[in-house]
Amino acid sequence: MNSLETFRGLKEDKTKERILDAARSCVLRDGLKLTITAISREANISRPTIYSRYKNTDKLIMDVLDREIISLIEFAELPSTLEELVLLIVNTTAKARTNDLLQLIIRVAPQLLLTYHFVRLGHSQMQVIDLLTFLIMRTEGIRAEDPRRLAVFVLLAVQASAVSGELTHSLIDDDTWRVEFTHLLEGYLK
């Protein structure tokens, strides 16, 4: 299974991964009242080691969120047709709409996401744009326009759909959402 990490060729830092795994577990268990001490206990890593990477929990939470978003993107092989690409995007967005960590943040601390919706694009958003640009450039059946611009607008549609799942759940069921989101993406990209 491929992911954005393998696409980008990112190196794995085992200590950082243990810290992020522990922080994710702590957030899911205790909410966003995260402490370096709790993470240290959960990861079985000393507090000075964690502090050498993270001065506070704010950056740590953002790294957990970035990693969570990146981990949602998986594909067995690169899509080559518009239908395959749209299916990848719909499936990834569906995972975001039901992801425990993302939904917890949306419910309890949506302010963590505001910067990345209104002020600037974050690290994971830029990685997603890069991946979408690459996939759009190599996919048959997509209109011949600037692939990066298309990638940005696809990301905007994905974000809006991912964070509004709970909001719209009483209006449309998951199957209807999949059908309509597929139409939206296919119509935009053709």
Image (cartoon, rainbow, N blue to C red):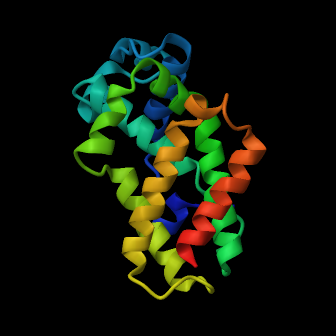
Q: Is residue 128 left or right of residue 190?
A: left
- In the rendered image, residue 25, in percent from the top left (x then y), is placed at 54, 23
Asked whether 179 or 135 is in front, the reply is: 179
Residue 115, percent across and down? 27, 39
* Quadrant where the image shows the C terminus: bottom right
Is residue 153 shown above or below 165? below
Quick check: 148 above or below 65?
below
Which residue occupies 52% across, 84% down?
143
Q: Which residue is located at x 47 percent, y 27 percent?
A: 106
- In this figure, what is the number of numbered marks? 0
Q: Is residue 84 left or right of residue 73?
A: right
Question: Is there any visible trace of residue 59 in the rendered image?
Answer: yes
Q: Quadrant of the N terminus?
A: bottom right
Q: Tell me the residue at 64%/35% (across/down).
A: 98
Whether residue 14 sits left or right of residue 99 in the image: it is left
Establish if 131 lies above or below 166: below
Q: Is residue 48 above or below residue 38?
A: below
The image shows residue 37 at horizontal and vertical percentages of 37, 12
Q: Position of residue 178 (x, y in %)?
A: 71, 51
Residue at 50% from the left image edge and 27% from the top image edge: 24
Q: Say which of 26 and 85 sits in front.
A: 85
Quadrant housing residue 174: top right
